[in-house]
Every structure is written in structure tokens, then in C-alpha cells.
Amino acid sequence: MKKWQILAKKIFKLIADNQFILYLAIFFAAFFVYLWIQSTPSFLDPDSFYHLKMSKLIAGQGPILDFPWLQFTVLKNYYIDQHFLYHVAAIPFIKFLGDLAGFKFFTVILATLFIFFTYYFFKKEKIILAEIFTLILLLAPSFLFRISLAKATAFSLLLLFLGIYLIFKQRYWLLMIISFLYVWSYGGFLLLLVMSVFYALAQAIIQTLSKENLWGKIGIKIIFSQAGKHLMIFIKNLLARENLKLIFATLSGLILGLVLNPYFPKNLFFYWQQLVQIGIINFRGLVNVGGEWFPYKFADLISDSGTVFIFGAISLVFFFITIKRQKSESVFFLMTTLLLFLLTLKSKRYVEYFIPFFVYFSAFSLSAALGNLKLADYLKLIKKESRRLWQLTVLIIIYLAIVCPFIMVKDLIITRQTFSGGIPFTRFSGIAQYLKDNSPAKTIILHSSWDDFPMLFYYNDWDYYIVGLDPTFMYNYKPSLYNLYADITMAKKSDNLSQAIRENFQAGYFIVNTGRPQLEANLQHDGNFVKVYEDGDGKIYKLK
């Protein structure tokens, strides 16, 4: 063996034996990946401007209890800051580093902490190849894209998976606290209650199958002759004291978070709008919702998931081959992955949960399948059983070792290129400044796209606007008013525009994006709109 090979082997062994070095390596690998992605003077999602503005407002005047900036939405009367703790946590970063750099660095830190926590979780649960599974999650393109958005995604994932860790460890009081904090941090807090219920189900399934020795015996005879008996045993296991305590701790924390809340009781109506009408029902056929609420095609989901589906497929095979060895954690992650897979096929935005759950399932199920066996020992074992199977396994490992790094690097570069083409941080700054300087306070501004609101709001909270954050909030306020707004801004309505706008919106100005020639033609044809400002982002028309 050559000297450099001996040295490399010693260095690898030193790193493998020194957990502190591995933790540092994972942290800095994630940190520099996310830092590189964020190194652009832009945001990829308009909502980032809203979140940044909320942090600035809270820093200056405390919690925002009323939201008059969206005059024709339900938020005018039923606003709550569903991301309150997320906005508070961002304040030190923007105070010391400035708005853009601070908020981007805050996003980098949150995403890095989630990857770091994932590695910690895996090591505590004695997951084999923990480093590999952590890197698979880090470089999964669809997940890399979503968690890098300057939104509450990483903050939510940290709280959710910390809650899952506490569920596994049965730390009831800490679970209650995390549940409370989750309500104050993210609108999807009910996910944690779902996790508690699913873990109780997973434990009941494993206990019933193991204690009743049903592995491999489930067939027609069992179904018809003993189904009732085993169903009762399953229900008994499900309602075990430990399971009920987990569910009670989670539910108690969530209820306290809702009631001991500066927005109570109007937060109940808001969450009905946010969780049910937007998150589940979704009016995408009636309103022009954001692209994240549209279905994810299965083929696109596979191609956008990098190596996650490769390792997931392998782990699924191992899960069913070694099902007798699987634990409640593996079953839990299988059930939650299937649920989130279906939700992702319904709406793209759930991919930020589906991908990490799929990776966690792969890690836990493969670890349970292999037990204490190391990969080298496993190869020796199957070599004794079947040389052809050993050869096939070696070929697969070589293939993955060559192809997977290539896929990961390619996906990372593509994601970085995507972020480089985001929304410039100065978007609408000129338009907003003109309105701030020339309009009376609280003037209502009509704008041609509902998702222009966050940028306008960030630069100008002097004036009020029509709709933003999600058009469903306006549709629920008054469907006929939303339809009128949509017809005007999409240039479907061309008659009596100024009269309709004055009577229904009381707007003093109309912002028109670039690339809206038909809408501009309609305004000019009306004769009651005067262009008072123009730049590369759009034009401002004042109503006579």
C-alpha cells in the first residue's frame, strides 16, 4: 500500500472515530451550501418581503395586532401573525446585518440547523450511514429549493422534528412546550398532533403484530375467524397510557398556544381560512392562487428529488423483506411519508415535508433491516448465501457511489442558478417611494397582480392595498368583489373602469406591471386615468 493511501486511511479513521469532527463537517457543509445559494441580491418568493417587513414592524412597534393594509380581504378584520416567533427570531439578524443580508443569513442559519439536527437525530437513534442520509437530504433539489426560500419553512421543520424526537423519547412536558411554541410560529401546527396520533398507531401496530405473533400469518383464515379479536387487541394497544399521554401532551400544548394568544379568539377563524379553505379545500379553480398550490406530477416529483427516490426505493424493499425487524419508528415514518406523498401530489408546497420524511423513513427502515451489521459484514454474509446476489449488490453500490455525487452536484448548481434569477430586492422601490411621497396617508392603491403586495408593503406601509398574501382571503371577503378585481386586472373588463374602481375600491392610484398592454389600453380608453410615474417595474396611473 502506498504512503498516501496509508495516510488517507488514517485520516478517514480519525474522522470516523471523532464525532466532534463529523458534527462540524456536517454543520459547515450545510452552512456553505445554503450560503452559496443565498449569495444573490434577490428573493425568489414574494412572501419573503412580507416576512422581512413584519420583523421590522415588530422590532419598531411590537406585535402587529391589526392589519389594515389589505382593505378588501378577511385579514382586515381577522388578521393574525401566524409566524410571530419566526418574525421575532429574525430581528437580531436584520438589526446587525441589514435587511437583505440579515434576513438571508437568518435563512441560512435556520436551514443549516435543521440539517445539523437531522444528523444529531440520526446519531442518537444509531442510524447506520447517518452521514450519507444527511447529505441525501441536504442536496435533494426540491427540498433544497423550498428550504432555501426566505420563509418559515426551516423554522417549522425544526420545531416539527424536535417534536417528533420528543415523541420518540416520550418527553411529555417538553413536547407540550414545543407544541405551544409551534402554534405561535407556524400555521401548520396541526401536523404535530398528526405525528402524535401516527406514532401511537405505529406502536399499536408493532405491539399487536409482535405480541400476538401475527407476522406472516395474516391471511383469509385470520381475517374471518380472528379479525375481531385482534382488532380489540390493537385498540387496547392504541389506547395504552403512554400513547394517550403523548397525544394529550401535544393537544394540550396546541390548545394553550391557541387560547393563550394575543389574537384569540379571532385566530380560530383565521386558521379555518388558512388550514381548511386554503390548505385543504383550495379554491384554485376559482381564484388565481400561487403555483405552490397546484398538483405535483409524479414524474416531476421523482426528477426533482435527486437521489431520495433511489434510496427510498431500496429502503422500501428492505423494509418489506425484513418486516419482522422493523420498529415502530420505521412504521411511523412510512405512514407519514405516504400521507405527505399524497398531499404533495395534490399541492407542490407539501414537498418540503415529504422529502425529509421520506429520507427519515429510508434511514430508519434500512437501519432496522441491517441491525448491528456493518456494510462490509453484510456483503460477506450475502456472499456466503449467493455469489450472484453479492455481485449484484457490489455493482449497485459502485453505481450509487459514482452516479449519486454527480446527481447531487448537478442539482446543487441548478438550484443556485434558479435563485440567481429571483425578484430583485429593489423591485417596486421606485413606485412605492413615489406613492409614499405623493399620496395622502392610507390612500388605497389598486395593483394589477395580487402577489405584488409584499414588495409594495415592504417599501411603503404609508398606503393601503387591495389584496395580497393569498387571493383566497379576498374571495372569502366578497366573491363578487374578487371577480371584479380579476376582470379589471386581467383586462377582461374595459367599460366604465374608473367608475367601477371608485365605487367598489375607493382607490386613488392604479399600479400596472410592465407587460400589460391590453390593461393599459383599457385605462387610456376610459380617459379618467393619468400616468404620473414610470420605471422598469411598472407604471402608476392616478384617477382623475
Image (cartoon, rainbow, N blue to C red):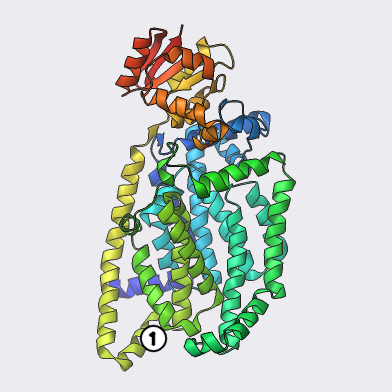
Q: Residue at x 57, y 11 (%)?
A: 440
Q: Residue at x 61, y 26 (%)?
A: 68
Closer to the camera in the image, 43 or 206: 206
- Which residue in the rendered view is the most extreme toward the bottom? 384
* Residue 89, x across and y down, in percent: 60, 43
Closer to the camera in the image, 32 or 256: 256
Category of crowding for the residue at label 1, using alpha-carbon neighbours closer than 10 angstroms: few (below 14), some (14–19), many (at least 20): few
In the image, residue 284 above or below residue 501: below
Q: Please, what secondary structure does the residue beneath circle 1 have?
A: helix
Residue 356 shows in the view: yes
In the image, residue 454 above or below residue 184: above
In the image, residue 140 above or below residue 423: below
Closer to the camera in the image, 106 or 227: 227
Q: Residue at x 32, y 93 (%)?
A: 384
* Residue 317, x across and y down, in percent: 38, 77
Closer to the camera in the image, 459 or 30: 459
- Which residue in the rendered view is the most extreme toward the front? 224
Residue position for label 1: 377
Kind of residue sitting beneath label 1: Asp
Residue 59 shows in the view: no
Residue 514: quadrant of the picture: top left
* Residue 64, x across and y down, in percent: 65, 32
Count of marks, rendered view = 1
Q: Residue at x 64, y 81 (%)?
A: 232
* Residue 273, x across and y down, in percent: 58, 42
In the rendered image, the quadrant that contains the N terminus is: bottom left
Left or right relative to 516: residue 217: right
